[in-house]
Structure formats: C-alpha cells, structure tokens
Image (spheres, rainbow, N blue to C red):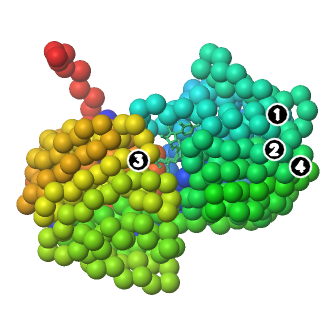
Amino acid sequence: MTQYVVHGGRPLHGSVNISGAKNAAVAIIPATLLVEGKCRVENIPDISDVHDLMNILTTMGAQVRRVGATTWEFDCTHVRQTRAPFDEARKIRASYYLIGALLGRYGKAEVAMPGGCDFGSRPIDQHIKGWEALGAEVEIIGGEVLAHSDARLKGSGVYLDIESVGATMNTMIAAVLAEGTTVIENAAKEPHVVDLANFLNSMGARVSGAGTDVIKVRGVNRLQGGFYSIIPDQIEAGTYLMAAAATGGSVTVTNVIPKHLDCITVKLREMGCRITELDDAVRVDAPAKLRRTNVKTMPYPGFPTDMQPQIAVCMALAKGTSIITEGVYDNRFRYVAELHRMGARAQVDGKVCVIEGMDGLAGAPVKACDLRAGAAMVIAGLAAQGTTVVEEIHHIERGYENIIEKLRGLGADIPRIDVPETAPVNAAG
Ligand code: EPU
C-alpha cells in the first residue's frame, strides 16, 4: 500500500509547470485508432489513465512508442482487433472512446462498460444515442457494450439531452469517418472538446464549431498521420492554484492557457486572492485569510465540477460560510466525510454542501475517494497543522503527473511511502 504523508502548515511558493490535459489525452489516444499512418502526439501527461489506454491499444495490435519526454507515436494502421481487453477497459472511464473510434473505423466495437470515479450513476445513454443516430446498433451484454453497423456510418443530427463531455467527444469520434455530415447540438464546450476537434482536424478530419454548442462533422474517407500537441491541463493548474490559496502561499502555474482558468480564478479573486495573468502563466497570491464564496458547478465555461473538492478545502479555511451546489453529478460529496476527520465543518444535503469556515484543519489519516477528492485531501493536508496520511493514492496518480515532485518544488514536505498491507479490521455498523 502506498501513501502520501503530508506534513502540513507550510505555505506553497514558487512555480510549477503544468502537464498536458488528461481529459484531452484520454480521448485523443483512442482516437488514434481512426488514423492510417503514424500520429505523433506531444504533451501527453505521464499518468496511469494514459498508460492504461496505451496498454489497451498495444494489446489490440497498435504500435505505441515514446519518442520524446512527453511525445508518443501511435500507429494503428494494422489494428484489426475490435474487442478491447475486458478487465483493462472496465477499469477506466475513457475506455468508452474506444467504442466511438472502433465503430468509426471498423463498424464494430466490443468494449467493457467504463469504470472511473464513483460519483453515483454515470450512464452512457447519450453516447449510445449518438452512435445509434449514425446508424449503429448497440447492445449491452455481459457488462460489455457491443456496437456494430453493417454499412458505413451515416452522418445525422444528434441532439444531446445533456451537455455531456464524453457523449460530445464520442459522437465526434464516431462521425469523423462517416458518410455525410453530423450535427451535434447541445454539445459540451470544454477546452478538451476543442482540443480533440483540433487533433482530428490535424489528421484530416473536417470538424467545425467545437467550443460552441453546435458542432458539425463533415465525414471524410480517411485520416492520415500527423503531429499534434495537447493543451495544458486546466484542472491540474486549478488544483495548484487552490493549493496555494489554501496554504496562504503564492504560486505561478506555467505552460497554461489563462483563458481556460478564468472560471477558477474568478472564484479565487472573490476569496481575496490576487491573480496575475501572463501570456502562458497565472500567478496567485493568497491573502492572510480567505473570504467565503458560493459555487455552483456547471459545464464549461461554468465552474468545473472537477475543481469542486479542491475549492471546498479553501472554503473550509475561509472566513464565513460558503455554499457549493453540485450541478453535474448526483453524488460528488463523498470526500466531505474525510474532511470531517480533519475537523472541517461541512454539511451535505443532496447536491448542496454548506461549509462553515474555520481557523485551521488538523492532520489526520484520510483516504482519496476519487481523483479530485484525493487532490483535495492533499491540499487539506498541506494546509493543516500536523501530519495527514492520504491513502488510496492510486486514484490521484490516475490523473496528476508527478504530483509529489511538483509539490516538493513548491516547498511541500510530502513523502510517498510504501507500507505493508494490514489485515482488515471487522467493523460493526
Ligand atoms: N450523463 C448522462 N448520460 C450520458 C453521459 C453523461 O446522464 O450518456 C450525465 C453524467 O452522469 C453526469 C453529466 O451527464 O451527470 C455529465 O457527464 P459528462 O458526460 O460530461 O462526463 P464524463 O464524460 O463522464 C468527463 C470527464 C470527467 C469530468 C466530466 C465533466 C473524462 C474521462 N472524464 O466525464 O473527469 O468530471 O467530463 O467535465 O473525460 C476527472 O477528470 O476527475 C473527471 C471525473
């Protein structure tokens, strides 16, 4: 069992380089299945979700090799396998993009229902709606999504009932090689939706409108190899900004697109932080005491649900009472029970969490319930007095490249240690 031991109470200072965007990379990697020829993709983050996807592609017959520090080359020209390895695919959420890509290229896909963070029910009905609109038949049997189309997929209108990031990107992926034009309405507008469209276009696709709520995909006969560089990770950058705010420090995140961070920095400003924007960097200077604020999470350009646990820690340390309304998922407050262990005063009622700010948190053993909740535990530990042991850190390492080294570079004292597994304790109740 590996844990982070966070010795808290030191403000973070300095600058940290932000890696490529996880949620763009995990769509672009499966989308390389559409391409005949070699794709070189730069700025791929070194995280376990990315490696899991690369292993799946390799098992299916793709050639995947590292050609630079953050650059990988993918050659899926000779892949003929349309079934993804079951156990590997069901571990991660982004394996659902394999379905769109296999369906688009071969008219057939067999991929386990996706895994990923547990935020309550996470259906994929809107993805299925997109594939079916393009002419595919889709069934779920034995925990596997079986999709096929005897003829080439046909472009069509797809109105998404929910502004779903995954369904928008998956419909786009499936539509790229379809015959005719697909129009996706009520599309998600996240930066990684635009990044996927730019990747596909750089390989020869004809996608327009990404970043607005109507995306048009004009089908082409084939995609050819090329070079692409992934955008910086908005959420990783936001996480370091929140860590600086919570610890009362000052941190510059570099290699970012400041515009993508506006929805986060606006809240930090409300909480009393000074924000300085540079060309490709953003600096936060925290006040002596944060001020309260309210947040409702929403699709981009709203405040991201993936920043909700991290800002909750700042609110727990702010002056006054803050309210978070979760507008995307059914159940994204499981981590609040962990914050209680550190003395936070927070009450959850359905999709609302009321947080009464206090003077400090106290270190405690806590667990990472999921990726962003895990990052929030690290932030809470950095801000707390005493030592916080964060368990189940595999969740964190799914999505944060070198988090320990990056935090150490900002002055954190946070060893990553291996401890022997202990026998489970039988607990009643
Ligand atoms: N939804 C449906 N039906 C669908 C698809 C989505 O009801 O077919 C619902 C979801 O249950 C949720 C809402 O729509 O309530 C939004 O879900 P969305 O499809 O936008 O999310 P996702 O594709 O499952 C991606 C990211 C998440 C991020 C969300 C929202 C990946 C692999 N995951 O998930 O990232 O929270 O978009 O921005 O890209 C993370 O990075 O920590 C993370 C959880």
Residue at the disc numbered 4: 180
Q: Are marks 4 and 1 in contact (CB under 8 Å)?
A: no
Tag 2, which secondary structure? loop
Residue 364 position within the rendered picture, expressed as x and y whole percent measured from the top left: 14, 44
Residue 221 badge = none
Furthest-left residue in this view = 359
Nearest to viewer (mark 2 / mark 1): 2
Identify the mark nearer the N-term, 2 or 3.
2
Residue 29 position within the rendered picture, expressed as x and y whole percent measured from the top left: 66, 50
The local crowd at label 1, few if under 14, some if 14 to 19, many if 20 or more residues have their Cα within 10 Å, is many
Residue at the disc numbered 1: 135
Residue at x 84% of width, y 55% of height? 218
Tag 3, which secondary structure? loop
Q: Are marks 2 and 1 in contact (CB under 8 Å)?
A: yes
Distance between the alpha carbons at the discs numbered 2 and 1: 9 Å
Residue at x 30% of width, y 64% of height? 242
Q: Are marks 2 and 3 in contact (CB under 8 Å)?
A: no
Between 226 and 110, the one lying in front of the other is: 110
Q: Are marks 4 and 2 in contact (CB under 8 Å)?
A: yes
Identify the mark nearer the N-term, 3 or 1.
1
Q: Judge left or right: residue 12 versus residue 165.
A: left
